[in-house]
Image (cartoon, helix red, strand yellow):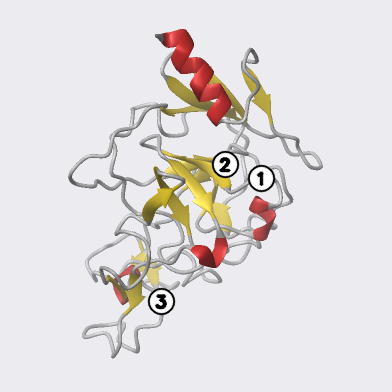
Amino acid sequence: MAEVLNTKILAKAGIACGAAVLYFAAVGAHSAGEVVVQGDDICIVSDGLPDHETGQFPNRGNPNAIRARDYTFCVDATPVKNDQPSTRGTIGISLNGVAIRPGTADWYDASSPRGFSRDNSSGWNLEGIGAAQSLGMDEANAHVGPDGLYHYHAVSNLLMAGMDGTQLGYAADGFEIHYVGAAMTSSWQLKSGTRPTAPGGAYDGTYVQDYQYVEGSGLLDECNGGYLNGDYVYFATDTYPFYPRCLWGDAEPEARPRG
């Protein structure tokens, strides 16, 4: 059973049957991830650095320096879709070994010199791309966490330039993540009107709460998922939520950067 399953996994991942590892070419001095099969899991082994150039870190909006971290990120090779979705911080990993963390831990805070902090009492959570300049995002729509981990908040040309096809990674529950441009549209829509509490102002995408899910307004479900060639997958989109913010399957404990 394991041998048959592994052959199927390898073929699906674009790895020639009989090979155990697929290496993604690095650009410049950066390393790339490698995809390996471990039992019934697909694992990406990485040092956390992308196969493309990054912005300068630290920078005015992000005080953290990029730090290489050797880790293995494993997901179920045969994911099952549950009746209800769940949420988590690290939503997945790209094929080049960089973590995907579309959400932020920053909230509007009038008492903070920066205008935001980790205090969530305001109820207004900064959206990574909507507040990209304040959070120091680079051209790859990525920045660095306090732990030194470089991670993506949205898809970019820099990321897709290194991909062979539409698949760019795996979600933590094992379903694939694809990018097909405008061919798949999100069902999350910007609200109209103004925010009822501070910070006030028009809904403009600066905060997660500026958006609402409107079923049927786009082609994708609430987790930015849909069907591709008969298989359920998640999609990265050019509009919010950019990457899935919830998962339909069960994420394994190893489905997070460790090391």
Indicate the position of residue 28 as horizontal and vertical percent values: 81, 42
Residue at 26%, 63% (x, y): give it: 120
The dot on residue 163 is 1
SS category of the residue bearing label 1: loop
Marks 2 and 1 sit apart, C-alpha to C-alpha, by 13 Å
How crowded is the residue under tag 2: few (<14 C-alpha within 10 Å), some, or many (20+)? many
Residue at 46%, 45% (x, y): give it: 229
- Residue 98 seen in this snapshot: yes
The kind of residue tagged 2 is Val
Discs 2, 3 touching: Cβ within 8 Å? no
The dot on residue 98 is 2
Q: Which residue is mark 3?
A: 205
- Residue 146 seen in this snapshot: no
Q: 46 or 70, which is in the foreground?
A: 46
Count of numbered badges drawn on the protein: 3
Q: Dividing the image into 4 quarters, which one contains the N terminus?
A: top left
Indicate the position of residue 199 as horizontal and vertical percent values: 31, 82
The kind of residue tagged 3 is Gly
Residue at 48%, 9% (x, y): give it: 3
Which comes before the other along the chain, label 2 or label 1?
2
Indicate the position of residue 102 as horizontal and vertical percent values: 44, 55
How crowded is the residue under tag 3: few (<14 C-alpha within 10 Å), some, or many (20+)? some
